[in-house]
Image (cartoon, rainbow, N blue to C red):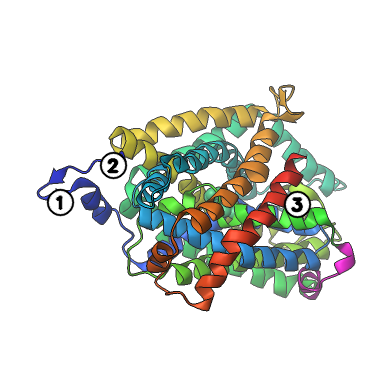
Amino acid sequence: MNAPVQPLNGTPLLVARQRNNAWSSRLTFILAAAGSAVGLGNVWKFPYIVGEHGGGAFVLVYLACIALIGLPILMAEILIGRRGGGSPIHGFRSLAVREGHSPNWQLIGWMGVGCAFLILSFYSVVAGWSLSYLAYAIDGRFGGANLAAGEDTAQVMGELFASLLASPETLIVCHSLVMAATMLIVANGIRSGLERAARWMVPGIFVLLLALVIYAATSSGQFGNALAFLFRPDVSALTWEAVLVALGHAFFTLSVGMTAMMAYGAHLQKRVSIPKAALAIAGLDTLVALLAGLAIFPLVFANGLEPGAGPGLIFVTLPIAFAQMPGGGIIASLFFLFLGLAALTSTISILEPVVQYFEQRRGRSRRSTTLIIGIAIWLLGIGAALAFNVWSHITILDKNLFDFLDFATSSVLLPLGGLLIAVYTGRVLSRSALSDELGCGKSTLFRLWHFVLRYITPLGVGLVVFYNLV
Ligand code: PHE
């Protein structure tokens, strides 16, 4: 165990630090964790994968994946984080040793922290796109009046996105701004950094999203069609690939599989019920994904556009809709502000476990650790940004650096991390330790959760990893 346990006025240092650094209430923990979960995954990715995979039936499978696989792993991650106490790597190691197992289980933590490092590098680039788009919106580029008569809106919006990707300077400036904001928040620690940010940003995210849904519902005349698209399952549109995509996305959207939720759980007070908190986090995350669909699809349908446009859905298709509707510029500004905030409450949670580990390991201050780690991730992110332009010829496994980072993390490392966390919880930690930490005895719910982690999750997730690799 590498936690510094030296007396500090009679109090072990680690304990003292935890007390200073614990979430101040259950609500702030839930807000911060929901902030982590709600991000580009909900607003950028979820709507476009629903669009690509035919709507309602996909949503149904996705909901099942969240409830049956995502939620149990989310509970497990928070549990390991809280019981382990220190950084994720330390947590995996100390709990395994306490139960008489090999310290090598800390490798799951290493994998998670490494995965966080990689995810943040390209996630920050996409978060940067939303900053650019916020600037475009404020600049009036999505106001219909600014388009010259006879100009083809679809072409203009397609070119706008292409020109953003072709500009290394813009991409790097926006990525740098996102990283700087993320580092600033994380450097200030749990209470004065992450918690303070989550307190106003997460409610802000909800208010903006509700305003957008109300707008879409009242102005588009297509709300019913959007509801039907999301909730009327057409099983014939479902493929095996869609099932695997839904399962993979369940990890990404709940932020599980890479120790972010462990890092947050490490600061959670003992009296808070983990099952209830996890349910609230997963519930809020799912609500935001569905509401994002209800904000986006009515506008897409009302303007005669296609829901299956892929990753360009909110950066090309939606702007076409903005440009065609009255007041589109204002709605676009609100939308990209909402997207930027949602991304930022996620980026801080991706940086946190990496900083926690090096802070604890090296005994350096949080500020200098954040600076060093942040700069390293920023540098890798520059590579991800250049993959769209000057470095587009550099490929790994036939993918440019950006696509490779996305594939390696979202399709392989996150599901694999989730699988290992399930195995670790279900087979390394004792039932008595688990039920003690969850505080729900050996109830039916506990047994069900334990069964899922031991059997269902490894099977389901193993299938996804295998599919993605082969
Ligand atoms: N859950 C975030 C989203 O949906 C992404 C994320 C993944 C955040 C992993 C933290 C850890 O955008």
Q: Quadrant of residue 180?
A: top left
Residue type, mark 3 in image: Leu
Would you call the spot at circle 3 few (<14 residues within 10 Å), some (14-19), or many (20 or more)? many
Q: Residues within 10 Å of mark 2 (few under 14, many from 20)?
A: some
Front position among marks 3 and 1: 1
Count of all numbered marks drawn on residues in the image: 3
Question: How far across and how far down the image is residue 188, in percent?
Answer: 33, 46
Question: What residue did someone put label 3 on?
Answer: 313
Q: Label 1: few (<14), some or many (≥20) within 10 Å?
A: few
The Cα–Cα distance between marks 3 and 1, rounded to whole angstroms, is 54 Å
Q: Which residue is mark 2?
A: 3
Say what secondary structure mark 2 lies in. Answer: loop
Q: Based on the picture, tell me whether residue 233 belongs to the magenta stretch.
A: yes
Q: Secondary structure at mark 3?
A: helix
- The disc at residue 138 is none
Say which residue appears at 55% left-offset and 63% top-offset: 72
Residue labelled 1 has its Cβ within 8 Å of some atom of ligand 1? no
In the rendered structure, which segment of residues is drawn in magenta?
224-237
Reading the chain from its start, which is encountered first: label 2 or label 1? 2
Along the line of sight, the residue nearer the viewer: 423 or 412: 423
> Which residue is at a point 71% across and 53% down the rendered structure image?
143
Q: Is residue 342 visible?
A: no
Residue that badge 1 annotates: 11
- CA gap between label 2 and label 3 equals 46 Å
